């Protein structure tokens, strides 16, 4: 790929070389014509025969021959001078292009460094009011608008979290306390829908938080997160086995816990009685593999989209589990992919970019139904 700096250098040097060649050719041609016009008449007569005696030197060359020698030498010096000046123009053009494009490199570096947690940074380019200064100021103004928009969204999420959870908690308490025992079936249905609404709200809030990125990062022992999730989860009729190595990642512990929890819940929910779930953490690669129904290839594109559910007999979720996982993985700069598991089920792999501590050991856990 040819950079703008290279193209500018070639343009500068090419224009210099073209103008230099044209100028020198014109000067040499005019000089030759002028010398021919002035010296030609002087040598129009035939030369006299000169006899040399002992010890005498031959006469000087004729003027036309001398003119040819001078012109030839001048052409040689012209080619040498153009070659040297072309090299000089390349060096000077390369340096000037670097100086001109320095503000663009600063703008590019700032844009690459920006995230939702660093929206307060600005380019603040100093210098004359030219096109590059105008571009930097426009970029800073866009960042101002984006920062205000993100701050407003975060306030909305915090307010929505409080405003939506409070009435659901009141409804749950009213159902549990206010309904008599003889309406147990209705009571259980109301509590079930109440819990589903609470889970949906929690999932939406987590999804919104993950998509907004991470404000603060801290070292999180991912192997400890996996162990805690396995210890809290109690899958029915599904055997869960795990192999973990010590691994730490810079991120948010709550979101990482939710990532592992959703992966395990998805592997259990989309399974069959007597099935298995394998969880592996090795070298910063988290793999969750389960048995279960076959997933059509054409449905793989829907796995990480919100509110997309595959058929399951283990209770319908909100359809946000894997989309939340994908958003959390993206917030942690991790790569995520899914592939079919031979014999049925899925294999989901999350590859984290790096660890905060070396791998020094392995733990093996298992949980039978």
Image (spheres, rainbow, N blue to C red):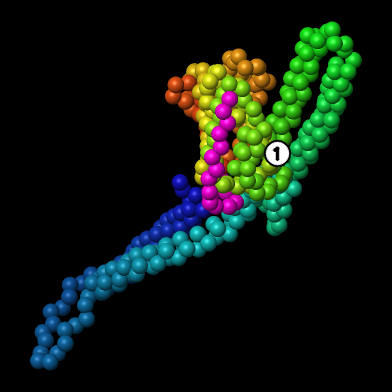
Q: Quadrant of residue 225?
A: top right
Answer whether residue 145 is visible to the viewer in this image. no
* Percent position of residue 315, x then y: 65, 17
In the displayed structure, would residue 307 be above or below residue 77? above
* Percent position of residue 316, x then y: 65, 17
* Percent position of residue 150, x then y: 76, 37
The majority secondary structure of the magenta stretch comes to: loop
Residue positioned 50% across, 63% down in the render: 92
The residue range painted magenta reads 353-369
Residue positioned 63% across, 46% down in the render: 221
Q: Quadrant of residue 368?
A: top right
Answer whether residue 10 is visible to the viewer in this image. yes
* Image-based side of 262 in relation to 286, left or right: right
- Which residue in the protein does label 1 denote? 254
Q: Secondary structure at mark 1?
A: helix
Q: Nearer the viewer, residue 156 or 276?
A: 276
* Percent position of residue 341, x then y: 47, 25
Residue positioned 79% across, 17% down in the render: 191
* Magenta-colored stretch includes residue 363: yes
Residue found at the far front of this picture: 368
In the displayed structure, would residue 132 be above or below residue 171? below
* Image-based side of 92 in relation to 134, left or right: left
The quarter of the rendered structure image containing the C terminus is top right
């Amino acid at each position: 790929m040819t950079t703008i700096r290279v193209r500018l250098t070639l343009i500068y040097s090419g224009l210099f070389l073209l103008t230099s060649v044209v100028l020198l050719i014109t000067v040499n041609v005019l000089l030759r014509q002028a010398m021919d016009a002035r010296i030609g008449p002087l040598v129009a007569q035939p030369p006299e025969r000169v006899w040399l005696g002992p010890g005498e030197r031959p006469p000087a060359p004729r003027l036309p021959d001398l003119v040819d020698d001078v012109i030839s030498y001048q052409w040689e010096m012209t080619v040498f001078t153009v070659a040297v000046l072309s090299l000089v123009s390349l060096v000077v053009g390369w340096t000037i292009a670097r100086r001109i494009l320095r503000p663009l490199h600063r703008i590019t570096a700032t844009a690459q460094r920006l995230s939702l947690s660093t929206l307060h940074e600005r380019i603040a380019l100093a210098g004359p009011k030219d096109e590059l200064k105008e571009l930097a100021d426009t970029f800073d103004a866009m960042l101002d608008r984006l920062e205000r928009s993100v701050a407003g969204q975060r306030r909305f999420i915090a307010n929505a979290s409080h405003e939506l959870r409070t009435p659901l908690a009141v409804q749950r308490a009213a159902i549990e306390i206010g309904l008599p025992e003889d309406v147990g079936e209705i009571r259980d249905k109301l509590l079930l829908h109440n819990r589903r609404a609470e889970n949906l709200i929690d999932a939406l809030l987590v999804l919104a938080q993950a998509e907004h990125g991470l404000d603060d990062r801290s070292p999180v022992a991912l192997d400890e997160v996996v162990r805690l999730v396995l210890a809290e989860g109690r899958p029915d009729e599904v055997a869960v086995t795990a192999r973990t190595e010590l691994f730490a990642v810079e991120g948010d512990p709550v979101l990482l816990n939710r990532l592992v929890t959703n992966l395990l819940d998805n592997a259990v929910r989309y399974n069959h009685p007597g099935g298995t779930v394998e969880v592996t953490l090795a070298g910063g690669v988290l793999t969750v593999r389960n048995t279960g129904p076959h997933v059509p290839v054409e449905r793989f594109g829907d796995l990480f989209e919100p509110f997309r559910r595959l058929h399951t007999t283990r209770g319908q979720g909100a359809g946000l589990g894997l989309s939340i996982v994908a958003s959390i993985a993206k917030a942690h700069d991790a790569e995520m992919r899914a592939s079919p598991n031979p014999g049925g089920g899925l294999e989901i792999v999350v590859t984290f970019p790096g660890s905060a501590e070396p791998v020094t050991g392995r733990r093996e856990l298992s949980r039978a139904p």
